[in-house]
Amino acid sequence: MSHHKPDPEKSVNLTIDGLPVTVSEGTSILEAARKAGVNIPTLCDHPGLGRRAVCRLCVVECDGGGKLKAACANNVWEGAKVVTGSARIMSVRKTILELLLANHPQDCLSCIRSKKCELQSLAATFGIRSLPFRREAPDLRPPETAAGTLVRDMAKCVKCGRCVEACQEGQTVRAINTSRRSVNFEISTPYEQALADGPCVYCGQCAAVCPVGAIYENDQTGEIRPLLGNSERHVVVQAAPPVGPALDDEIGLKRGTVTAGRMVGALKRLGFAKVFDSGFSADVTGMEEGHELLDRIKNGGRLPMITSCSPGWINFAETFYPDLSEHLSSCKSPQQMFGALVKTWYPRAAGIDPALITSVSIVPCIAKKFEARRPGMDSSGFRDVDIVLTTGELARMIKLSGVDFTGLPESPFDSFTGDSPGAGTGDGVMEAALRTAYEAFTGKILAAVDFKELRGSRGIKQAEIDLKGTKMKALAVNGLANARRIMDSIRSGECDAALVEIISCTGACAGRPCGSSETPLRRADSPDRTGQALPFRNPRENPGVKTLYGQFLGAPLGEKSRRLLHSR
């Protein structure tokens, strides 16, 4: 057996369907074919996961040999002659698909992934209209809804193993695994327990990679529709910054079609009374976290302080690192802070009975559904956030309503405080917290306001700022496997950072609907939500934030903000 390590600097020349191709050594046949513009179908392959060679749809012929090779699992070699579309290969692929379909429910019309299902698309590509094989008895287990967040319908599972790898390798949670062998092989949970009874942290990465409708978000659109038509309810919504670009992908529009203004217009047409930018509450969170960090530095508090805006990460920390809970910021997430303010400050400013308000959040993150249900998220006397919709759920509502984005005029976000812009700085909570802490500590404006080294999709990023001669390190971490590395270093006393931001998604906040194979959107690449450079870069300069603290909250970390905006 060869143990040759591929040299990425070395080039390999081969032909694929007669086309000459040059790629780096170590490139898979599948990747080389894509570079040559040759499409090889696959069901188990995913750009964010490793090689599995489970579905075998990507088989190819090499150098005229009789044995077919899986293109995803075999690297290229010098002089290889690869054939991807012979009659034999096409027949094998079609048979594989027919076998999969023989053991798959035929309820495409009612499936949540209809027209977005990879199996459905492949069946259409191969022209499969009838099955030569006997239909297997359907899996009679009803779909399982875990904590009102994730739904698992294992009758639709195609056993590709994507969710297992995402959970075990990408997130190191291991709430999903495989069991049994041969025809009894299946995707399962440890001891076949309910997902809610295991270590699942509801990060949603399993749903993000599932090619069919076997794992998806708990759809709450049926709960919100009657409320939007109820004149006795005042339904307001907060929308997260990545929602607009993600809607382009979900609805099938050209990137950039769903601008922030058109998204606001669409939400108003759906019946929402007010549409707020959750970037505003991100600034409020940055204020609170910045002052909490400063308080810990000055008074010998537990460092590093770890941000608490990603609910999947918080679930992970509570499950695997309960001994490090004092490192977690006490601040609620922007979603929950906004919800608390919607039930307190907003009704006071607008003259509305808070009991009549339904607070809705639209986010790309499935775990936010779980967060809204957590104990303690009702410090105002009302539930902070009543309903959480993912980008996919919003897209389905928009499609059903018949809204045409190309004809929608631009509409501004509503003003939360009534006398100021409704937007935030748009740079994220961690950057806002760093600017706030620096300026509160030094009394000076931070010269370099951008923390570009903390942006992007790399797993662990680092930046430093100088607090009057003391270097303060900050880390931004994406993905729970990387989070585990950082938490282990904190536990061992090796981590010298003062502030750590952890996001459970593996490519920064994904922004993409569940089931999308799109590369995660990076915060640094997200388009500006207003189309104009905002006049303020520090949360303290935000006129709405000034009004909020001046007329209602008082000081950051004050009695009222502690009660409403913090979890402990």
Image (cartoon, rainbow, N blue to C red):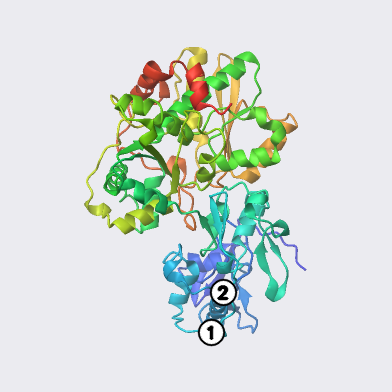
- Residue at left offset 64%, top offset 27%: 304
Residue 241's place in the image compared with 95, above or below, is: above
At label 2, which amino acid type do we have?
Leu
At mark 1, the secondary structure is helix
Residue 112's place in the image compared with 481, above or below, is: below
In the picture, residue 231 is in which quadrant? top left
Q: Foreground residue, 148 or 381?
A: 381
In the picture, residue 158 is in which quadrant? bottom right
Relative to residue 509, is residue 329 drawn left or right? right
Position in image of residue 380 (x %, y %): 47, 28
Position in image of residue 444 (x %, y %): 45, 14
At label 1, which amino acid type do we have?
Ser
Residue 483 can be seen in this image = no
Q: Foreground residue, 88 or 432?
A: 432
Image quarter in which the N terminus is found: bottom right
Position in image of residue 491 (x %, y %): 73, 32
Relative to residue 451, is residue 355 drawn left or right? left
- Residue at left offset 38%, top offset 48%: 224
In the picture, residue 340 is in which quadrant? top left
* Pointer 1 residue: 91
* Pointer 2 residue: 57
1 and 2 marks in contact (CB < 8 Å): no
At mark 2, the secondary structure is loop
Query: Around disc 2, counting alpha carbons within 10 Å, would you say few (fewer than 14), some (14 to 19), or many (20 or more)?
Result: many
Position in image of residue 72 (x %, y %): 59, 67
- Residue at left offset 51%, top offset 63%: 213
